[in-house]
Amino acid sequence: METAQSVRTAFDLTGRVALVTGAGGSIGRTTAEVLAAAGATVICADVNGPAATETASGILGLGGRAESAELDVSVRGAAEALVGHIAARHGGLHVMCNIAGIMIDSTIIDLDPDEFDRILSVNLKGVVYGCQAAGKVMVAQGGGSIVNMASAAVLAPAPGIGPYAICKAGVAQLTQTMAVEVGEYGVRVNTVAPGFVPSNMTARYYTNPDGTVNEETKAAMVKPMARMTPLRRVGVTSDIAYCVLYLASDASSFVTGQLLSPNGGVSMHY
């Protein structure tokens, strides 16, 4: 019989170590906070070192366990070095969240080759490197959960974000293939594909030249987005972070190779 205690235990990450890339950004930061609140020791990694430190400091200030690290996921060997350091320091790695990502706006016809290389390096190769590094440790220790961040853009085409969607589609396929390859070792690999969430990435649409948020432009953008969503609202970062928690925890112990898309119902899939 399931009890209140067994339900709490299913989501409890006490004693586990989690690495979150992109932890200086909006979704990454909230994910790090949620995993820490669930009891994990969270290594907050980001290419922006001070932002990673700010996330870790906020967690520590609330009594959680956290460390920070500067990490450029696009650099070959960087994730492997960091994961090796974490495993040596903490005795293993139980949760890997590949959230770091960038965006470029371009049609396919006008796509600049250098920009395409740049987004592939971060959004696809960076996830591959993270999966490889974490996967080796998790296979050796006999278990773990890898959560990759994709996008609802893989569920329905949209003009102008093709390069981003291509990378995220690759992440979804990477997730399924790796899930098959490492499942027998107790390692689970899943994808979260968020719908529209006001965040550091989407802020480019409503940020003034001086870096401040143009609230009028933001409202003009968010209102129609919410109107076309069955739930009549856009997402918030915690909507995504709690999906990550589910996939990171024992509550999803029979779930692997899946794509979970918190998008308010804009895109629905079997």
Image (spheres, rainbow, N blue to C red):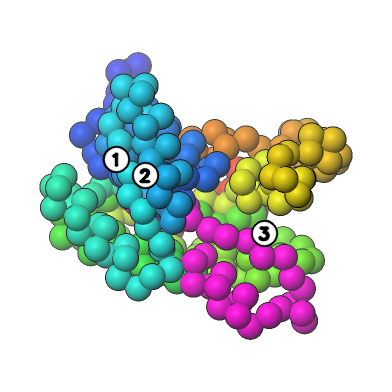
Mark 2 Cα shell of 10 Å, populated few (<14), some (14-19), many (≥20): many
Q: Quadrant of residue 217?
A: top right
Q: Quadrant of residue 157?
A: bottom right
* In contact (CB < 8 Å): disc 2 and disc 1: yes
The answer to whether residue 100 is above or below residue 266 is below
The residue tagged 3 is: 153
The residue tagged 2 is: 44
Q: CA distance from mark 2 to mark 3?
A: 26 Å
Which is more N-terminal, label 3 or label 2?
A: 2
Label 2 sits on a secondary structure element that is strand
Q: CA distance from mark 3 to mark 1?
A: 32 Å
The answer to whether residue 181 is above or below residue 266 is below
Mark 3 Cα shell of 10 Å, populated few (<14), some (14-19), many (≥20): many
Nearer to the camera, 58 or 130: 58
**Residue 163 % position (x, y):** 65, 71
Extent of the magenta region = 96-123
Q: Which mark is residue 67?
A: 1
Residue 111 in view, yes or no = yes
